[in-house]
Image (cartoon, rainbow, N blue to C red):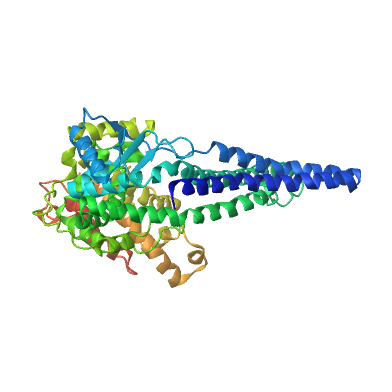
């Protein structure tokens, strides 16, 4: 399909949304005319009111669709003067791809790359181009793999995909934004109605009257009815543009393989899939693990610290497994990208081009991060461009302190239900802190009252109905977990134990040097677990746990 025909097709699909709205409004106007001609006065007024109520969501949908725009990702523009090697690489790849180089390169914080073009006349005339390049790609790929990624994106320029993307993206963004907003408005109306009814019910109870049953289901009916045609068209629109988008991606893959090499392109897809999972893990377990307590790693490490995880010896086996086991399933029937496994299979089926990934014939096995000058400053500046003002205002601490304080806070939260249950029994600690609470719990265990504490722990409905032995078995896992967390807190607060940073595995609780060699020589998690287990047995035995606390503190 030629460029002009694709532009016409995209325009027709875009206009279809307005046609749906015109038809819906036409039906309402026809109903008003019919009511004016044949309905009695009261019925006519009711029809008018219903028409207005139903027309508001339609008009709102048209307005939302008209004003919707695809959001440009946040990022850090890099100049040719500041990053000449990166720009030189992109210009060389553009020449080899047979297209005009982008006018701007923007670094982002995502494991992704993309291109945009601000076109005119429905995409028939070219405009300024931007290349978005995720910093994690620079961190985790080799230069050869990054060449393949960039060549793939530049191929969209050569195929005129981006010149039509303005229409297609506007349509996709418009239908999705409209449907989502109308649904949100429906939920808001229901919430408003529920709040009114709840307030009326409270007032009735206050005056000694029986409150009416709360039923807000009718609220938002107009939005609920009018969103259905838009929703149906959204599904049609996304499916209609689905096949074209996938063909464009596969064509870009083939061009990338010709420019950067078959093996480099296939390995880039494998590595990017693994990198995506590794990046998610890094962000949640390391970079933003302290956000809830207002902490971030040192400046530049939110994105720059990813390389520490990727190079950790203990992570290599897991990364290799991610590269080998690609996700085969489609994440969504509307996704314009074919499954990674399919793309890799098609690329690897291409004829051998003699550019193998052995570092000798390929020649570009160097880390792609080497293309950046002053990497630490760039990663720090990227944080300023991407992070929210609230995140940028958070305190910065070094990695060991971040991990210790973050895990300590989560352990406190996990131990809170047990400490609350302890207070519900009426038992009182002689001091403050986890060690005092632990001592009281051990005393209660020795007195045969530990299951009295367990009875005050949060229960599932099934556990709440259980009694006798069954109730104890329901409570035992929660009691064991809470007691383990409380013991670790006591060791941290009273014995100086710290959760130590490990890039190869989870944080490990350890006592400081100088303590008992049989305790400081290994992580405390296993020792604590072994000491806590007898305490929650049918016949509690607190000796091992008491000995651990005594020798540690």
Place of residue 330 in the rendered image (x, y in percent of width and height, measured from the top left): 40, 61
Q: Taking 73 as reference, is 527 left or right?
A: left
Q: Taking 279 as reference, is 212 left or right?
A: right
The residue sitting at 25% across, 62% down in the picture is 350
175 and 136: which is toward the camera? 175
118 and 377: which is toward the camera? 118
Kindly tell me whether residue 190 is visible in this rendering: no
The residue sitting at 40% across, 56% down in the picture is 246
Q: In this view, does 226 lie above or below 59?
A: below
Residue occupying the far right of the picture:
40
237 and 401: which is toward the camera? 237
Kindly tell me whether residue 454 is visible in this rendering: yes
Place of residue 313 in the rendered image (x, y in percent of width and height, measured from the top left): 14, 54
How many marks the image carries: the answer is 0
Place of residue 279 in the rendered image (x, y in percent of width and height, measured from the top left): 28, 49
Residue occupying the far top of the picture:
81
489 and 166: which is toward the camera? 166
The residue sitting at 18% across, 62% down in the picture is 352
Residue occupying the far left of the picture:
360
Place of residue 354 in the rendered image (x, y in percent of width and height, measured from the top left): 14, 58
């Amino acid at each position: 399909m030629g460029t002009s025909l694709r532009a016409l097709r995209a325009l027709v699909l875009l206009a279809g949304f307005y046609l749906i709205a015109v038809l819906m409004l036409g039906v309402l106007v026809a109903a008003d005319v019919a009511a004016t001609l044949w309905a009695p006065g009261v019925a006519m007024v009711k029809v008018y009111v219903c028409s207005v109520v139903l027309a508001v969501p339609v008009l709102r949908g048209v307005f939302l669709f008209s004003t919707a725009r695809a959001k440009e990702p946040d990022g850090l523009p890099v100049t040719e003067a500041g990053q000449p090697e990166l720009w030189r690489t992109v210009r060389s790849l553009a020449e080899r791809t047979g297209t005009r180089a982008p006018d701007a390169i923007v670094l982002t914080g995502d494991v992704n790359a993309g291109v945009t073009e601000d076109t005119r006349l429905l995409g028939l005339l070219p405009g300024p181009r931007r290349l978005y390049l995720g910093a994690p790609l620079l961190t985790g790929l080799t230069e050869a793999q990054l060449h393949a990624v960039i060549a793939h994106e530049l191929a969209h320029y050569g195929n005129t995909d981006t010149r039509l993307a303005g229409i297609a993206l506007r349509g996709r963004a418009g239908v999705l934004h409209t449907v989502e907003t109308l649904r949100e408005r429906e939920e808001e109306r229901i919430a408003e109605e529920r709040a009114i009814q709840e307030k009326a019910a409270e007032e009735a109870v206050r005056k000694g009257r029986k409150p009416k049953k709360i039923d807000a289901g009718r609220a938002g009916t107009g939005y609920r009815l009018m969103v259905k045609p838009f929703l149906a068209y959204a599904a049609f629109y996304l499916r209609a543009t689905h096949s074209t988008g996938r063909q464009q991606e596969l064509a870009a893959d083939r061009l990338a393989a010709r420019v950067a090499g078959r093996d480099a392109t296939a390995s880039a897809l494998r590595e990017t899939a693994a990198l995506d999972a590794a990046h998610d893990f890094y962000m949640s377990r390391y970079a933003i693990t302290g956000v809830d307590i207002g902490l971030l790693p040192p400046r530049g490490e939110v994105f720059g610290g990813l390389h520490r995880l990727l190079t950790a010896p203990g992570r290599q086996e897991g990364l290799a497994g991610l590269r080998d086991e690609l996700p085969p399933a489609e994440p969504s029937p509307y996704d314009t990208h074919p499954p990674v496994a399919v793309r890799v299979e098609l690329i690897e089926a291409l004829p051998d081009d003699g550019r193998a990934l052995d570092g000798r014939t390929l020649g570009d096995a160097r880390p792609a991060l080497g293309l950046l000058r002053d990497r630490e400053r760039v990663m720090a500046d990227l944080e300023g461009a991407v992070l929210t003002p609230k995140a940028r205002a958070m305190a910065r601490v070094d990695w060991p302190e971040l991990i210790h304080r973050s895990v300590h806070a989560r352990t406190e939260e996990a131990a809170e239900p047990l400490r609350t249950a302890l207070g519900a029994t009426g038992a009182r600690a002689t001091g403050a802190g986890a060690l005092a609470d632990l001592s009281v719990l051990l005393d209660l265990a020795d007195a045969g009252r530990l299951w009295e504490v367990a009875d005050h722990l949060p229960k599932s409905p099934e556990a709440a109905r259980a009694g006798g032995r069954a109730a104890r078995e329901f409570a035992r896992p929660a009691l064991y977990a809470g007691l383990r967390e409380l013991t670790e807190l006591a060791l941290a607060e009273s014995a100086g134990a710290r959760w130590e940073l490990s890039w190869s595995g989870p944080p490990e609780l350890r006592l400081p040097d100088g303590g008992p060699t049989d305790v400081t020589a290994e992580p405390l998690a296993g020792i604590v677990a072994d000491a806590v287990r007898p305490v929650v047995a049918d016949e509690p035995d607190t000796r091992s746990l008491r000995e651990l606390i005594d020798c540690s503190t």
